[in-house]
Image (spheres, rainbow, N blue to C red):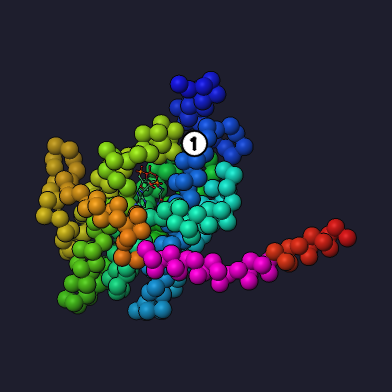
Amino acid sequence: EMSEQERVFQDRIDRGEKIEPKEWMPEGYRKTLIRQIGQHAHSEIVGQLPEGNWITRAPTLERKAILLAKVQDEAGHGLYLYSAAETLGVSRDELLALLHNGKMKYSSIFNYPTLNWADIGTVGWLVDGAAIMNQVQLQKTSYGPYSRAMIRICKEESFHQRQGYDILLKMCLQGTHEQKEMAQDALNRFWYPSLMMFGPSDKDSVHSAQSMQWKIKINTNDELRQKFVDQTVPQAEYLGLTIPDPNLKWNEAKGGYDFSEPDWNEFFDVINGNGPCNVERMEARVTAWEDGAWFREGLMAHAKKQDARRAA
Ligand code: ACO
């Protein structure tokens, strides 16, 4: 049963009003947002690792400058999102502690390795492509600060997707036979993990129903996965690459492709910490946090000194 206060809140959501930080909200709404925005922020930060790995090995100065800018953008996205989460009454330090002790998740996709330059193209094309597909609808999410962060992030994300596709255009349309084979191999490895980014199938999605009633989520996991496949297949065709799915087939009646589901056992394995790079990713984040301690302490000492001067 909804209380009067909860009913008034739901009416505001139904009318399409945005909820702002100081306004009343059900505890479940606040908790769900902290979980989702926090997980989203962590994904942006951890997502720097697989690509950062290739900054020093980019094939040209131009590609290096582009990749560097993209990876820096991801750090910025993480910061907007931590700020959005902080408006809900949780601090950035608390969120990071929960990431570091394994109590909060980040996107499954970043637990896969980037083995070569074709992977960097493929990550931009598929991973950023999937991220945009999810984030475009989140611009309409009911929580004001999250929605506004998404607008900016989507603009930058579309540059990220294009830079990835551009790498693959070069490799597939102007490259050598070996380069095209590298691109196909990268697609083979990243296709299903990219489909997993949208979360479990709707029947196994524990949060979707409530999150959609609150308009925290606008579309279901399966709806977005379908849209992603429909958008991506023609892009693969243009590159002359084959989607690694023998069941992929245009379905005229539904106006979309039929396709194979990813291996959900693998998905749950990865989000429970057992993917190929989970340990490496967490070690890198925890080490970065520990190595940065002297700097945070220095900043705090400086701020204290300034405060003391002002008080004197
Ligand atoms: N990776 C890791 N965990 C996932 C993933 C995934 N791809 N998909 C779902 N999960 C987790 C959920 O967090 C939830 O676990 P929890 O209860 O411990 O938090 C569980 O699996 C069940 O899933 P759902 O009930 O479907 O969860 P939810 O309603 O939160 O939907 C989704 C998942 C679609 C990822 C949603 O949280 C979302 O839209 N998040 C914002 C977008 C985002 O985080 N993008 C990050 C990747 S893109 C990038 O940053 C570049």
The type of residue carrying mark 1 is: Tyr
Residue 160 visible to an observer of this rendering: yes
Residue 9 located left or right of residue 242: right
Residue nearer the viewer, 277 or 62: 277
Q: Is residue 48 magenta?
A: no
- Does dot 1 land on a helix, a strand or a loop? helix
Which residue is at 23% across, 48% downward?
230
Residue 221 lies, in percent from the top left, at 31, 43
Residue 80 located left or right of residue 191: right
Residue 66 visible to an observer of this rendering: no
Residue 59, image quadrant: bottom left
Q: Magenta stretch: dominant SS?
A: helix
Q: Quadrant of the C terminus?
A: bottom right
Disc 1 CB within 8 Å of nearest ligand 1 atom: no
Which residue is at 22% across, 75% downward?
179
Residue 137, image quadrant: top left
Q: How many residues crowd mark 1 within 10 Å: few (<14), some (14–19), many (20+)?
A: some
Which residue is at 20% across, 63% downward?
188
Residue 142 lies, in percent from the top left, at 48, 37
Q: Is residue 202 above or below residue 113?
A: above
Q: Is residue 281 magenta?
A: yes
Q: Which residue is mark 1?
A: 29
Q: Is residue 289 above or below residue 224?
A: below
Residue 18 lies, in percent from the top left, at 52, 35
Residue 148 located left or right of residue 236: right
Q: Is residue 175 above or below residue 129?
A: below
Q: Which residues are magenta?
A: 278-299
Q: Quadrant of the N terminus?
A: top left
Residue nearer the viewer, 237 or 37: 37
Q: Is residue 307 above or below residue 29?
A: below
